[in-house]
Image: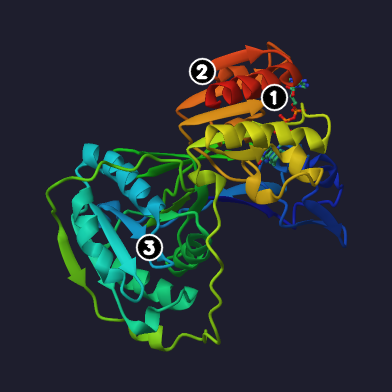
Amino acid sequence: MAKIAVLERKCTGCGACAGACPFGAIDMKEGKPDLNAACKVCGICVKTCPEKAIIKLETKVDSVDKSKWRDILVFAEVSGGRLHPVSLELIGKARQLAAPIGFQVKAVLVGENAGSFAEELRHYGVSQIAVYDDPALSFFRADAYAACVEDYIKFAHPSVVLVGATSLGRSLAPRLATRFHTGLTADCTKLELRENTDLVQIRPAFGGNIMAQIITTNTRPQFATVRYKVMDAPVRQAEAAGDILNRPLPKAVLASKVTCVSVQPVPPKQSISDAEILVVGGRGLQKEADLEMVKELARLLGGDWAVSRPLVEKGWASNDRQIGLSGRTVRPRLIITCGVSGAIQFAACMNGSDHIVSINLDPDAPIFQVAHVAIVGDLYQVLPRLISQLKEERA
Ligand SMILES: Cc1cc2nc3c(=O)[nH]c(=O)nc-3n(C[C@H](O)[C@H](O)[C@H](O)COP(=O)(O)OP(=O)(O)OC[C@H]3O[C@@H](n4cnc5c(N)ncnc54)[C@H](O)[C@@H]3O)c2cc1C
């Protein structure tokens, strides 16, 4: 850690530092430089000051004893009376990360009747399953759920905690990270674990133009959220293993400041993330009515339809049909993109699909770098032919 300090007795108030700062982080106040929150400690002001009145101070940071934090904990989410499938995907990733450095994978279940899923988790290579099962946890209250997971973290000292980037997980993980004064990286697309137990949390940044590698070097545990359908779920093992640890309810749960007034279940909605076959329309479509071709092909294939972001912006589809960084991540068995260029913000969220077929006029379109089958052509010719051929076969 470093910070910038101004030696007032040496400073002449010339303002050279303020002029040189690329971040506009220096205001001249009463003839002296005053650093604001935009300072990135780049040190340009230090080099610019003719009087050497600005210095960079390196401060020593207390480092955690990493050897006291072991294993990987997965928050196994139970919501709507089911174990969310992202929980198994996280367990699969956790096992891959844990094995090379001799860590174990543990899971924590929270909720009324959450304990009923513990036995099933024993088939996925988890060494311990902690259960907080109580009527007081009958619906998600962030403070109460955080109190339970906090309790188990204090008991088990995991080095890494993985949480699904679901609505529930996105509310829970930041609260937990704050309680432990530690780091959290949201929406990781890739995770690696170094020998020194630092978790390399990889995710797109700056609008998807770079893949940032984020490391929590001085604190533990390390929190990461991962979207559904980004990691592979492990195969269920025939034999069950691992202890089930029923934990007493932490007192903080009963002191929750959230009261449930009523519960109105939202009818379950089909999500494009669950589709096995997807046909996707992009800006290559000239008008809204042409989206019908995409929908018809999807129908004939027994799949669902989705879009790239520009079509949502035009109001042709709702946001829950958008694939991409600001939409959903998908991993179907078959995806057919029609008139989609394949910008990184789109491609990063569908390139794990089993079979990618792309139709585009431009042979150099980036989508062809991830496609398994490239159809260089006009979607207005290709789609009607595909549709009529499928109809003929059905007939
Ligand atoms: C922070 C940020 C987040 C973003 N999040 C998302 C996101 O979640 N999802 C998303 O999709 N985008 C997202 N974007 C936008 C993204 O960068 C692209 O602009 C967008 O994906 C482009 O959509 P498109 O491929 O449909 O359109 P275009 O890039 O305009 O591509 C249209 C393609 O259609 C082809 N084409 C044209 N006519 C035909 C035809 N007749 N037949 C066949 N092909 C044809 C063209 O050759 C072209 O390749 C994001 C951008 C930013 C900065």
Contact? badges 1 and 3 (CB < 8 Å): no
Name the mark on residue 341.
Answer: 1
Q: Is mark 1 within 8 Å of ligand 1?
A: yes
Determine which quarter of the picture holds residue 244.
Answer: bottom left
Above or below: residue 82 compared with residue 142: above
Contact? badges 2 and 1 (CB < 8 Å): no
Disc with the residue nearer the chain's start (1 vs 3):
3
What residue does disc 3 label? 82
Distance CA(mark 2)–CA(mark 1) = 15 Å
Quick check: can you spot residue 205? no
Distance CA(mark 1)–CA(mark 3) = 37 Å
Q: Amino acid at mark 2?
A: His
Mark 2 element type: loop
Which sits in the foreground, 46 or 205? 205
Q: Give how far across and how far down residue 108 sits, in percent.
A: 30, 64
What residue does disc 2 label? 372
**Quadrant of the picture in which ligand 1 is shown:** top right
Which sits in the foreground, 22 or 394? 394
Distance CA(mark 2)–CA(mark 3) = 35 Å
Q: Residue furthest front?
A: 395
